[in-house]
C-alpha cells in the first residue's frame, strides 16, 4: 500500500519538474561596447553570441564609459532633443543615453551620434528581444575606451 507521504513526495517532485520546465532559464547578458574599435560584443552566460559595428558619440558628444544596466526600454522612441529622430528598439542605460537602431547605416563603424550607441535596426531588434527575454536585471552594459 502506498503511503500518503509517498504520494505527496511524488506530487511535490512532479510540481518541481513542471515549474522548472515552464520558468525561463536564467541567463546573464553582457553587452560590451569598445569605442576605439566601434564594435559591440554580446555574450550570454559567458558565450559570445554577436559582434556588430556601432556608432558612438562623435567629437563634442561623448558616450560615457562605465558599467550600466538597462533603465528603460522602448520599441519605438523619438528623440525630443534631436529633431524627433527615430530611435527604434531603444535601451536607455544612463539618463538620455541609449542603445538603439539607426537608419544612418553608412556611418556605422565610426563615431557619428550625439552620445547614444547606434546599431543596424535588425541588430537593435535582436538585442532588444534578448534583453527583454532575459531581463534588465540580468543585463550588464560595459562601455570602454
Image (cartoon, rainbow, N blue to C red):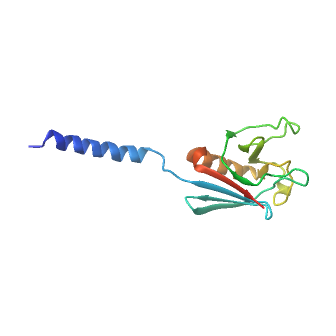
Which one is in front, 144 or 77? Answer: 144
Which one is in front, 60 or 88? Answer: 60
For residue 102, side relative to residue 131 (left or right): right
| Picture quarter with the C terminus | bottom right
> Which residue sits furthest left?
1
> Which residue sits furthest front?
66
> Which residue sits furthest right?
60
User: Which residue corresponds to the image point at 12% horizontal and 43% vertical from the top-left?
Assistant: 2
Give above or below for 145 relative to 23.
below
Which one is in front, 119 or 144? Answer: 144
Q: Position of residue 93 (x, y in %)?
A: 71, 45
Give above or below for 8 relative to 29.
above
Q: Where is residue 104 in the image (x, y as percent from the top left)?
A: 84, 51
| Picture quarter with the N terminus | top left
For residue 47, side relative to residue 121 (left or right): left
Could you say which quadrant of the image residue 95 lies in? top right
Give the total of numbered labels.
0
User: Which residue corresponds to the image point at 82% horizontal and 57% vertical from the top-left?
Assistant: 108
Q: Position of residue 121 (x, y in %)?
A: 74, 49
User: Which residue corresponds to the image point at 13% horizontal and 41% vertical from the top-left?
Assistant: 3
Q: Position of residue 54 (x, y in %)?
A: 78, 57
> Which residue sits furthest top?
80
User: Which residue corresponds to the image point at 57% horizontal and 49% vertical from the top-left?
Assistant: 138
For residue 125, side relative to residue 15 (left or right): right
Could you say which quadrant of the image residue 105 lies in? bottom right
Amino acid at each position: 500500500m502506498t503511503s500518503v507521504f509517498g504520494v505527496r513526495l511524488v506530487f511535490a517532485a512532479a510540481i518541481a519538474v513542471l515549474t522548472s520546465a515552464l520558468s525561463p532559464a536564467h541567463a546573464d547578458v553582457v553587452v560590451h561596447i569598445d569605442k576605439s574599435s566601434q564594435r559591440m560584443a554580446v555574450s550570454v552566460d559567458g558565450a559570445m553570441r554577436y559582434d556588430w559595428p556601432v556608432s558612438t558619440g562623435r567629437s563634442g558628444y561623448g558616450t560615457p564609459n562605465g558599467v550600466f544596466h538597462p533603465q528603460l526600454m522602448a520599441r519605438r522612441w523619438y528623440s525630443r532633443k534631436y529633431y524627433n529622430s527615430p530611435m527604434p528598439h531603444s535601451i536607455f542605460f544612463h539618463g538620455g543615453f541609449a542603445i538603439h537602431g539607426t537608419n544612418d547605416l553608412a556611418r556605422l563603424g565610426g563615431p557619428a551620434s550625439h552620445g547614444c550607441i547606434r546599431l543596424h535596426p535588425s541588430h537593435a531588434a535582436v538585442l532588444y528581444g534578448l534583453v527583454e527575454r532575459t531581463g534588465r536585471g540580468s543585463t550588464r552594459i560595459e562601455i570602454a575606451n
